[in-house]
Amino acid sequence: MLDWIETKLMYPAPNPLDGDWNPMWLRFEDVSIPSRSGNTIHAWFLPHADPCCSILLCHGNGEHLGYLSEELDFLRRRLRANVLSFDYPGYGNSRGKPCEPGILRDSESVLHWLSERICSPSASVVLWGRSLGGAVAVHLAARFGARCLVLDRTFDSVVEVAAAHFPWLPVRLLLRNRYASAKTIARYQGPVFQVHGQTDQIVPLERGAALFEACPTRNKAWICSSSLGHNDPWPESYYQAVEDFLDKRT
């Protein structure tokens, strides 16, 4: 029962029938990527005619590709980038059931596919993670390197987030999915650009700040917004800040 509750709370995958799965206006490649776990991972790749970089976007735990077409196209145009995003197992059209080992293993297969598609090493990719996806991006950066690690309202450990929301439960003993990003990021020495909001009701500000403090690199930037909620869109100035960071410090 506890395992079932944990899965439902941590992986609230949207209905796979919701969203726009056939955006006729969007120029993209619909991709099925085989994973070492045996799953087939569904992804969208948006190529840019003259890219300045390539981005792998790891989305949050409450969304899937059917919701992301406008954001992916915006990132391609705004940052002049190739953009790849994918669904975790059990999300959208990706096969399997979501769990920490499976998600991390499948994300590695996706990164390798992107590296081969752009004919560049994995370490040249901008890894961009939002919320739960931040933990996925940290894992990839620690294992394979990155041109830059962009972290959007993510955490040092999902155990600490759960403890903040359920202080009366022994979550530190019970949780199977732990995503210990603060420990993992110690193995990554590259650039980090991180954003968090003081009004975030899902991932408390101190959890994002703890992850930033755990980054061993000096090549890092922190933006803390007084008004940014967990699911609010970024203002234009944040994208400009990312672009400047990529141009000047990578």
Image: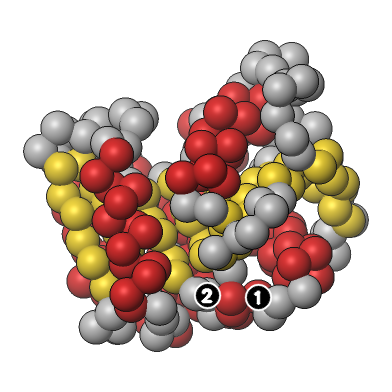
Q: Are marks 1 and 2 in contact (CB under 8 Å)?
A: yes
The image's mark for residue 146 is 2
Out of 80 and 200, give the one closest to the viewer: 80
Q: Residues within 10 Å of mark 2 (few under 14, many from 20)?
A: many
**Which quadrant, please, contains the C terminus?**
bottom left
Q: How many numbered marks does the figure carry?
A: 2
Q: Residue at x 51, y 37 (%)?
A: 74
Q: Earlier in the sequence, mark 1 or mark 2?
A: 1
Give the left or right position of residue 226, taking residue 163 as reference: left
* Position of residue 97 measured from the top left corner of the image (x, y, whole percent): 74, 41
Residue 80 lies, with reference to residue 214, above or below; the image says above
Residue 176 in view, yes or no: no
Amino acid type, residue under disc 2 in the picture: Ala
The image's mark for residue 44 is none
Alpha carbon of mark 1 to alpha carbon of mark 2: how far? 7 Å
Disc 1 target residue:
122
Q: Under tag 1, what secondary structure?
A: helix
Q: Give the residue at the far top of this rendering.
A: 18
Out of 224 and 2, give the one closest to the viewer: 224
* Position of residue 27 measured from the top left corner of the image (x, y, whole percent): 74, 35
Q: Give the residue at the far left of this rendering.
A: 226
Residue 136 lies, with reference to residue 171, above or below; the image says below
Amino acid type, residue under disc 1 in the picture: Ser
Q: Residues within 10 Å of mark 1 (few under 14, many from 20)?
A: many
* Position of residue 24 measured from the top left corner of the image (x, y, whole percent): 76, 20
Residue 167 lies, with reference to residue 249, above or below; the image says above
Quadrant assignment, res 183? bottom left
Q: Residue at x 80, y 70 (%)?
A: 116
Q: Residue at x 85, y 64 (%)?
A: 36
Q: Under tag 2, what secondary structure?
A: loop
Quadrant assignment, res 70? top right
